[in-house]
Each structure stands twice: as structure tokens, then as C-alpha cells.
Amino acid sequence: MKHIAIFCLCFVLVWATPLQKSPLKKVSVKDIDSRIINGDQAGLAQFPWQAALYIGSYFVCSGSIISEEWILTAAQCIDGVGTVTVLAGIVDLNGSGAVVQSSDLILHKDYDPDYFLNDIGLVQLRTPLTFTRYLAPIALADNLLEDGLDVTISGWGATDSDGDESQFLNYADLVTIRNRECTAIYGNIQDSSVCAKSETVTVQNACYGDGGAPLVLDVETDPVHVGFLSFIGGDTCESGYPSGFTRTASFRIWIRDETGV
């Protein structure tokens, strides 16, 4: 893992920041009321597709279950890594759930860590998962996400810019924005990315440790995986700048070719 420094997405107004403050930071036991930057704590089975990725005993990122043997995540989460451990079916990182080792890690061949391009990766599991109400796959978007839609992000990332990752899964509601609005802030945003931001008075946002965290449409009725977290903007998670997500639909053929899903 090498994404420790802060990079600029393009040489414009604000910084875009990689999603791990340190890839080897231990999981912090926080108060049960911890929040993903002013979000809410998730309940069991609320996000059954969510998986936690570990290197050794250290939590690094989130991923999404897309089948019994495949986890979808950001390339930055598994770049340069030999193997990861996946913990699924939980909301508490110290809780009991399915624990599976990876058998293979696949990065998109055109992944560019400096500009967050093609930031997509796959984790193949050594043994298949058994689905339950607490552990289940999520459908993947085939169509590009429109702007102005309500979406939900969930993750175990830090609850403030100076904090450690949260022990408990938290979630927040965001709204997608036009790529040209995001481009005005960061410089050129590729069609394969989408930005979303908080529209509440109190800023809700992702933070360090939320890399690969799923962005989901219609989370309470017919959940569809439409993206996952690639970068955050500004020098703090509370900045209010949009966060950037890899669009699931842009890589739907690639996912299918690699996994059969």
C-alpha cells in the first residue's frame, strides 16, 4: 500500500485526498455513537453487502459483496498487496462474522494512482461465502448514474479528520452532482467517475478509511451498487467539498469479464 501522501487530482482549486491516512493503522475502539462525519450508525442486516478488508490484523478499506466468491473495491485498497482478509456479515469490526482469505487480487490494467483513474479492483475469495440475511450480494448498476439523485455511502472510516477508523459501520446520505460541477472544483473529472456531496446544514461526508466504500441507490427499497469511494476533497473530511466515486456502470463489462458476475 502506498497511498499515504496527499495528491492533487489536477492542479486546480483544492486537494483530492486518498482514502487511507495510514494503510497500517490499527482499528480504534470508539464510542458506540461514533459517526461517519455526522452520519448514523448502521444496524445488522442494513447493509449486508458490506465487507471489511484487512491486511494482516489491520483494517484498510471497505468492499462490496457481488457474489459468493468476489468482492468489489477500489484499486488503491489492494495495490501492491499480496493477500487480504475479508470480514463480512458484521457492523462491528470486533464482532463475529464470516472471515475469508483472498485467493487472487485483480487491479484494472489502466489504474493510475496519481490521478485516481480506473480506480477499481476485485478480490477473489479462497472459499465461497454462505449468504444469510446479514451477508448477501448487491446488484450492480448497468446504467450511468444521473445527477441530483439521493445516494447512500456506508463505511468504517474515521469520524473526524484527526481520528482513527470507526469500530462501527456508519452511513450518510449524499446527492450526486454533475461532472462539470465537480470539474470546476478539481479539474477534469472522467466520465467513469461521479461526485456526490452533502446537502444538509451539518456536513455529512466520507473520511479516511472509507476507500472502496459502496455508493448505493435506493438503499431501502431496491439497492443498486452505483459506485465506490475513490477520493475526498479538501484538507479535512469536514470541508464540504464533493467526494469522488468510481462509477460501477462504467466498468460493468470489465467486472463481468473478470468474474462472470
Image (cartoon, rainbow, N blue to C red):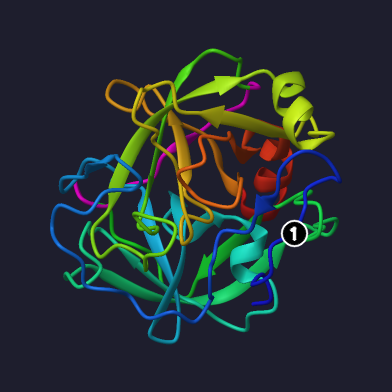
Question: Which residue: 84% across, 45% down?
Answer: 10
Please check the rendered image and state whether residue 119 is part of the magenta-colored stretch, yes or no.
no
Residue type, label 1: Phe
Residue 81 visible in rendering: yes
Q: How many marks?
A: 1
Image quadrant assignment for residue 59: bottom left
User: Which residue corresponds to mark 1?
Assistant: 7
**Magenta segment range?**
132-144
Question: Which residue: 36% across, 47% down?
Answer: 49
Image location (x, y in percent) of residue 6: 69, 62
- Looking at the image, residue 199 sits to the left or right of residue 242; the answer is left
Please check the rendered image and state whether residue 141 is part of the magenta-colored stretch, yes or no.
yes
Q: Is residue 62 above or below residue 242?
A: below
Image location (x, y in percent) of residue 206: 45, 46
Image quadrant assignment for residue 254: top right
Image location (x, y in percent) of residue 222: 35, 22
Q: Is residue 29 above or below residue 153?
A: below
Q: Nearer the viewer, residue 134 or 113?
A: 113
Q: Nearer the viewer, residue 21 or 24?
A: 21
Question: Which residue: 25% across, 65% down?
Answer: 167
